Image (cartoon, rainbow, N blue to C red):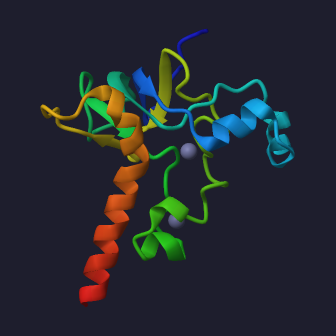
Amino acid sequence: MDTPRISRDQLLVRVKACGICGSDVHIYEWTPSYSWLTKLMPIVPGHEFAGEIVEKGQDCVELNVGQRVTCMPFVPCGICEFCQKGRPMICESMFGGDGIVGLHHNGALAEFVAVPEASAFFYRRTSHSSLEHWPSLSRSQPTLWSAQAWRSEAKR
Ligand SMILES: [Zn+2]
Ligand SMILES: [Zn+2]
């Protein structure tokens, strides 16, 4: 497969680990609710992953080559009701906007994946964080983030 070409606001990530989500199984089994993907085929699935940045677009300013990242598979809009309430993982634009990595764009069940910098998370390496465990962080990080947001909201 060709290495993905990144746009100005994207990172090229060398995939180190990729989980297989229930939705990937639905794609594999081609269950009827996923037939909307027909027009996007062929597509590389994989949206729960971790890896190392090997290249970055010229507009990327937060993260750098060599850093290890995981990501939300889409860029939350930041302005819809859910984003405003600190629940970006159910952003109204999830199925709009630029789409979802591994569904609307080629995903991470490949050597490289292109992801928007705006949706990437950088993790410091610790003794108990092996990269093989990171794909689960791509889902748990937004969950923890939301739990924290709800907590602080509840205190107000
Ligand atoms: Zn998933
Ligand atoms: Zn939103």
Where residue 100 appears, x then y in whole percent? 60, 44
Q: In this view, does 89 lie above or below 33?
A: below
Side (left or right) of 128 relative to 65 = left
Q: Image quarter for residue 131?
A: top left
Where residue 115 appears, x then y in whole percent? 47, 34
Name the foreground residue: 52 vs 61: 52
Where residue 56 appears, x then y in whole percent? 36, 26
At horizontal 54% and vertical 18% (from top left) the residue drawn is 110
Side (left or right) of 115 relative to 70 = right
Q: Quadrant of the C terminus?
A: bottom left
Res. 96 visible in picture = yes
At horizontal 41% and vertical 36% (from top left) the residue drawn is 135
Judged from this view, the residue extending furthest toward the bottom is: 156
Judged from this view, the residue extending furthest toward the top is: 1
Res. 59 visible in picture = no
At horizontal 61% and vertical 9% (from top left) the residue drawn is 1
Name the foreground residue: 41 vs 60: 41
Name the foreground residue: 12 vs 14: 14
Q: Image quarter for residue 133?
A: top left
Side (left or right) of 102 relative to 150 = right
